[in-house]
Image: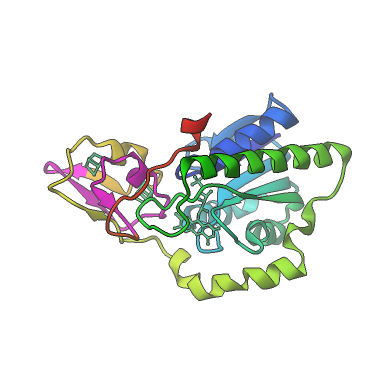
């Protein structure tokens, strides 16, 4: 078995690490953007696949990863973990339907509410104590899911008919996750040219050119750069409000 994840700001990675620690410590986990991940997948039948929900949908980088490797999923067994700031309807169901279309068997899924990662928009912001509580609740849900899985209980109901109906809200935002974004704003006066943003970007969307950071219109909206930067980058908002990492609490 192998764990594959995409994580912009750490929530999803944290949840998968937690899941694996309880299920089987020997499972290797690997970020989907790493070269070599796909080759590793070919050697495993069982996959735990984890990602955050963006606009009740898959991040573009995650959708591309599944679709561009469509021939590899046939015969695989996939367990899905979807993390979210509030609500996604059938967030795990979105990839489940894709995997099934490409011949995989989806063996279960888990929705986990985690702290919101959009650090330049006020909505959904919680205090550190509230965030800690959210993480504790997610850990409880992981524990119970692992327990069920070990007992052979089906966890597929997370995308039953009712959840699919709720997931209908994604139609409203549909266009936002179908293309990569060029919405990054870089304040050149505030930028200290440290290059951190370019190093962490999973899309190689940022580069240091003629002593300034340039974005190339290939942003998957993961907020990794905004979270790492000294407040010179924004995407959906105009000002960084709260940079958060689940790893700071544990
Ligand atoms: C562009 C964007 C859109 C998001 N849309 C949703 C959403 O529709 N529903 C939701 O509950 N959370 C949404 N979130 C919050 C993330 O899903 C959540 O914080 C997630 O745990 C982040 O995981 P990560 O730290 O692994 O990147 C969104 C985050 C981003 C960056
Ligand atoms: S991380 Fe921020 S400060 Fe550093 S180079 Fe990138 S934009 Fe500039
Ligand atoms: S530019 Fe920033 S938000 Fe966009 S994909 Fe790269 S790291 Fe993520």
The residue drawn where x is 83% and y is 36% is: 150
Q: Residue furthest top?
A: 26
Q: Is residue 41 visible?
A: no
Colour scheme of the picture: rainbow
Q: Residue furthest bottom?
A: 172
Magenta-highlighted residues: 208-235
The residue drawn where x is 43% and y is 60% is: 123
The residue drawn where x is 76% and y is 50% is: 108
Q: Is residue 33 rendered to the left or right of residue 165?
A: left
Image height check: is 30 above or below 102? above
Q: Position of residue 74 (x, y in %)?
A: 71, 51
Q: Position of residue 158 (x, y in %)?
A: 74, 58
Q: Nearer the viewer, residue 74 or 114?
A: 114
User: Is residue 214 shown in magenta?
Assistant: yes
User: Is residue 218 shown in magenta?
Assistant: yes
Badge count: 0
Ligand 2 image position (quadrant) = top left
Q: Is residue 168 rendered to the left or right of residue 197?
A: right
Quarter of the rendering containing residue 22? top right
Q: Is residue 178 rendered to the left or right of residue 157?
A: left
Image height check: is 189 above or below 236? above
Q: Position of residue 194 (x, y in %)?
A: 21, 34
The residue drawn where x is 47% and y is 57% is: 124
């Amino acid at each position: 078995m192998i764990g594959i994840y995409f994580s912009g700001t750490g929530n999803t990675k944290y949840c998968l690490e937690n899941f694996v620690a309880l299920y089987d410590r020997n499972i290797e986990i690997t970020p989907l953007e790493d070269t070599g991940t796909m080759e590793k997948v070919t050697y495993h039948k069982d996959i735990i696949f984890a990602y955050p929900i963006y606009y009740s949908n898959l991040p573009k980088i995650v959708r591309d990863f599944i679709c561009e490797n469509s021939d590899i999923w046939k015969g695989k067994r996939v367990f899905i973990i979807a993390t979210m700031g509030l609500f996604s309807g059938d967030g795990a169901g979105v990839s489940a339907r894709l995997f099934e279309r490409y011949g995989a068997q989806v063996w279960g899924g888990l929705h986990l509410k985690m702290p919101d990662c959009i650090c330049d928009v006020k909505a959904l912001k919680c205090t550190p104590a509230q965030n800690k509580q959210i993480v504790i609740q997610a850990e409880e849900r992981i524990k119970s899911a692992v327990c069920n899985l070990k007992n052979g209980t089906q966890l597929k109901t997370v995308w039953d008919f009712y959840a699919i109906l709720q997931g209908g809200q994604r139609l409203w935002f549909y266009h936002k996750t179908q293309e990569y974004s060029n919405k990054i704003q870089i304040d050149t006066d505030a930028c200290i040219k440290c290059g951190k943003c370019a190093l962490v970007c999973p899309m190689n969307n940022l580069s240091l050119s003629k002593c300034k950071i340039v974005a190339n219109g290939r942003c998957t909206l993961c907020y990794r750069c905004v979270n790492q930067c000294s407040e010179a980058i924004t995407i959906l908002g105009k000002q960084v409000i709260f940079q958060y990492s689940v790893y700071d609490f544990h």
